[in-house]
Image (cartoon, helix red, strand yellow):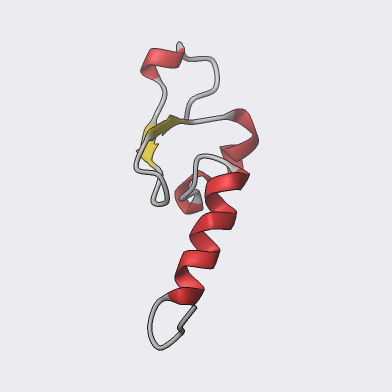
Amino acid sequence: MGGGRKPSERASKICVACGLPFSWRKKWERDWDNVKYCSDRCRMSGKTAEGRGAGARA
């Protein structure tokens, strides 16, 4: 996917938690199709937001 390419030529996605674009990284090479979040912080905030969805009250 992105290995050996310039950063400007690598694949990118939009983070589902913060809405910012992020680029392909070597550590995501095997699982790029399933990557949804740009960072651990967004991944953790995304999971807590999912839990609050239907029926849960704070």
- Say which residue appears at 54% left-offset and 66% top-offset: 48
Look at the picture and state if 56 lies above or below 3: below
Q: Residue furthest top?
A: 6
- Say which residue appears at 54% left-offset and 22% top-offset: 3
Q: Residue furthest front?
A: 58
Q: How many marks can you see? A: 0
In this rendered view, identify the residue nearer to me: 49 or 24. 49
Q: Is residue 44 left or right of residue 57?
A: right
What percent of the width, then of the height, locates residue 33? 46, 49
In this rendered view, identify the residue nearer to me: 12 or 47. 47
User: Which image quarter: residue 44?
Assistant: bottom right
User: Which image quarter: residue 6?
Assistant: top left
What percent of the width, then of the height, locates residue 13? 37, 38
In this rendered view, identify the residue nearer to me: 42 or 1. 42
What percent of the width, then of the height, locates residue 28? 59, 39
What percent of the width, then of the height, locates residue 41? 59, 46
In this rendered view, identify the residue nearer to me: 35 or 50. 50
